Image (spheres, helix red, strand yellow):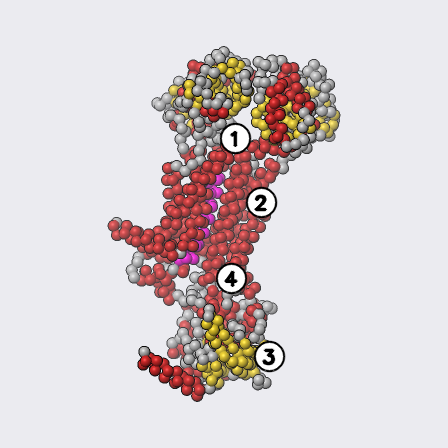
Amino acid sequence: MKSLLMGFQHEIKHSLRQLRRRFGYALLTIAVLACGLGATMYVLVAINALILRPLPFPAAERIVSIGDRSPENPGRLNGLPSQDFLDLRKELKSYEHLGAYYEATINLADDTEAQRYEGIFVAGALFEMLGEQALLGRPLNEADDRPGAVPLVVISESVWRDRFGADPDIIGRSLRMNAQPATIIGVMPSPFAFPRQSQVWTTARFVDGAHEDSQFWGQIVGRLKPEVSTDAAAAELVSVYERLKAQRMDLRRNLDGGLMPMAKAFINSNTRAILFIMLITAFSVLLLACANVANLQLGSLAARSREFAVRAAIGAGRGRIIVGVLSESLILAAVATLVALLIADAAGGWTGDYFARAEDSPGYWFTFQVDARVTLMAAAVALLTTMLSGLIPALRASGMALTRALNDSGQSGEGRFSRVGKGLIVGQIALSCLLLIGAGMTWRGLQARASFDLGIDAAPSSLLTARAAIFNEQFPEAADKERFFAAVTEKLRADSNVVAATAAEALPGWTAGGDDVIVEGQADPEATLEVFKSSVDDHFAETYGIPVLSGRFFDSRDQQASQAVAVVDQRFVDHYWQGQDPLNRRIKLDPEDPTSQWVTIVGVVRPLQLEDVDDDPQPTVLLPMRQSPVRFASIAVRTLGPPMAFAPRMAEIVREVNADTPIYWVRTLEQVLRLDGAGDRFLALVFGIFGLVGLLLSSAGLYGVLAQSVTRRTREIGVRRAIGAETGQVARHVAAGAARLVLIGMVVGLGLGVPWAKMLSSNALRMTSFDPLVFALVAISILASAFIAVLIPARRAIRIDPMQALRYE
Amino acid sequence: MSSNALITMRDIKKVFYTDEVETHALSGIHVDISQGEYVAISGPSGCGKSTLLSILGLLDSPTGGEYVLNGTPVQSLDANQRARIRNREIGFIFQAFNLIGDLSVFENVELPLTYRDNMNKGERRDRAMEALERVGMAHRVKHFPGQLSGGQQQRVAVARALVGKPSILLADEPTGNLDSKNGEAVMTLLDELHKSGSTICMVTHDMRYAEFAARKIFMFDGRVVDEETLHRLRTEEDQRLRQSLAIA
């Protein structure tokens, strides 16, 4: 054992000396490995942050989410109505604490200012379960949450500092929360923002026995008692639901109550699939780097064959030579791992910032940092890398024929690609094909998103949009609500900088309502169609640039008391009345509601996409705001100057109409659409970087192997020149070997790319499963990079002076 | 210039420049070689015989002078033109054989023909086999150089030199890497080739093998000298060397 350790120590020393002598080679190898390891570490940082690291709450392993198991999306829990929470709280016995919450924007107003924040309505013992202490005052508790009680408010440290100037006497301060008197009772310390980026928490005050329509849908979470297993809690939930179904007529018969660890509920199966794909991709980059390094080492070992033969001749066993070569790989992999950890930490930080900027954080506690677990995984990956990159060369070195190596005069053919070397090059090309296919497909997905036709002519960059919400307490009547938005848009239009202004429930490409619809006289009176719908004012079409294809848009004829009307888009017409005149036909939204009425179609507009572009296009129904007033609306203006410059004036105008109504989500439509696609853009960027790194690595690998080959074949090339090979023939000869390998690698890579693309499209990303353009571009990129990689060694080969070459040893 | 001269060299000079040193490897060489001649170039190490052979074989260009090969001035051709002439007019036999280890015996011999346009595979095969028959290596076509003895490798190298039916065979110390038995065999082979009409120009420092040639060219210090002068110059140099050693 001692001699083994001493031997290993000696080999490490020897390897360090060797690497110092071949500093350029060591640097190149470390850089190549750091690329592959960096990609892998980065994904490991993400997996650690999102899946492996426990939640930062006491007894986090016992915290579970309760919801409706989604049949369409297994592994995901849908929210439940507030009545379910109230009932479950009474019935379930397995929990220490049970709480519920739903996310909403919350308006805080006082005599000087009104502002809307990202907020949470909290029911039950949510804060007790989270165990987080307040910076000032106290968090909400279960006793605070009583129907009819004065709403209590907890604010974040950032709101306390930015809005209230870090007032030490903030506790007990009265203000208006969504137009109701409320009291601040606590300030939560940074970075607490449960669940994602909340700034304000307030009591939900769910009313037991509330009508179905006035219930809130939210998430239920609880901490199990220590002695209760997850299975037992799940069984209890099922039996309680069975009882509730018998008691409550409003409960859906197909409701399937279930629970899962809260950590899993936050990172759903879709995100897990994406992480898995990212891991495969990163591992491909690592494999590519290892293949590259293995090939570089093979080249370097060929030059050192005499050294190994001498060592073997003086008694070094095969094992010792293997240890010698592996120790060199270990040193290189260790240094590369350190570099990779730095890369991964920086990239992790960037990822956190990216999602924070995109307002799309999966949970406030997720931090993408290198920690002890990642470091441990890095050590394991480094060992794996050592084996992957060093084992083949080590076995090769240990198996070199002694006498041949000692007597080798350069004619043994070591200068050509060995079978292993060939395999490694083919593997590298195939892997870079796969990486590029991933990058290409995400890029095409983004392109499809960017070119998605919302149905509006106005440039998204020219539209300033903002959300505004009014309260029933201040605007109790339908007409009051409509008048508020009409007053706002009228004032906006009166401004000399405004070309057009509108208020609508929907913001095209971002959000809209949804409803079922039937048409009068349809064959099957039960058959409904799901549509996007929105209440809009008379200026919606003009502001967004939506052409009216037939009939008319809403105008002053459409008053609250006049005939109920609607405008539909061409997609709706095509669904029901292809080629027929839809005007004056009647439809009914939400046909199950006995109070809903028939509305008459007065106009048809171009097909619209009111919802997120990720949602499948659906027919659209527009209703006049006067007949269908709303509390929440998106205001949009087209301005003469830069749209964002008008934002302060827009806020001022809204405040002038009602001082308690701030605008929020103030963005150009272009920014809105960009925020919406942030996740896809992130993936495209990651895949793009991985693809580019893969391409660079495979080209560098091909170049390295060819360059080494040309160097070692100097004499052979000299002989060829001496017996009459012209420059073109030499260049072709050098390129031909590489071309064959590149073509084989491409065929393998593109062939494997078909199922890979299918997996990408079906698991995570919204894209077509086979895109010939992507495959063609990948082939072109590989050929182009291979051409460049071959060019320099080929040029070197044709410059070889036969006279010099024949003297070359 | 004789009327049937295959090679005519007039006042060939070769100067090597390294940093501040100017080395005159060849100083005004005049050489004629006729069709069917067997010429040996001899001289002590460093006398310029290998440089002369490189220029003869168009592997190198002279610094000055005129070189006519088969009626064509070749001293100022570009690299590709020289390669084409080497391929068609010249067959090389190297001291270190210089076979390509990854190619079989047949492929090594066929190689020069692959650089010719308009020669089909069948013709290449016939020519390669014919050359291998001539050197007695047709039974080893599938072997690789590493599997052959030195003498066999050199025979394959001769076959490769012959396969293109060149105007002249240039042999640079063809026995240098062989034992005496194999060396004799190779020399016998060259002799047979000469007798069957090949023009051969061989560089050797071994006078025993130079005797195989019908004509000997002696070189000393970059110049062609006659045999008597060579002896005198070598004796004088030996004496100078002995004196300087004695003084030291």
- Chain letter behind tag 1: A
- Pick whichever, B147 or A82, lies toward us: A82
Q: In the rendering, which numbered label is found on residue A774?
A: 2
Residue at image coords 42%, 67%: A809
In the rendered view, tell whether residue A590 sits above or below residue B3: above
Q: As shown in the figure, which amino acid type bears the numbered disc 4?
A: Arg
The residue pinned by badge 1 equals A359
- Crowding around mark 2 (Cα neighbors within 10 Å: few <14, some 14 to 19, many 20+) is some
Residue at image coords 30%, 58%: A316
In the rendered view, tell whether residue A527 sits above or below residue A181: below
Of discs 2 and 4, which sits in the foreground?
Answer: 4
Determine the secondary structure under disc 2. helix
- Pick whichever, A346 or A786, lies toward us: A346
Chain-order first, disc 4 or disc 1: 1
Chain-order first, disc 2 or disc 1: 1
Q: Quadrant of the C terminus of chain B?
A: bottom left
- Pick whichever, A404 or A558, lies toward us: A558
Q: As shown in the figure, which amino acid type bears the numbered disc 1?
A: Glu
The residue range painted magenta reads A276-301
- Crowding around mark 3 (Cα neighbors within 10 Å: few <14, some 14 to 19, many 20+) is few
The residue pinned by badge 4 equals A796
Q: Quadrant of the N terminus of chain B?
A: bottom right
- Pick whichever, A250 or A160, lies toward us: A160
Of discs 2 and 3, which sits in the foreground?
Answer: 3
Q: Is residue A541 left or right of residue B40?
A: right
Q: As shown in the figure, which amino acid type bears the numbered disc 3?
A: Gly
- Chain letter behind tag 3: B
What is the distance, in whole Å, between disc 2 and disc 3 at their CAs?
Answer: 59 Å
The residue pinned by badge 3 equals B71
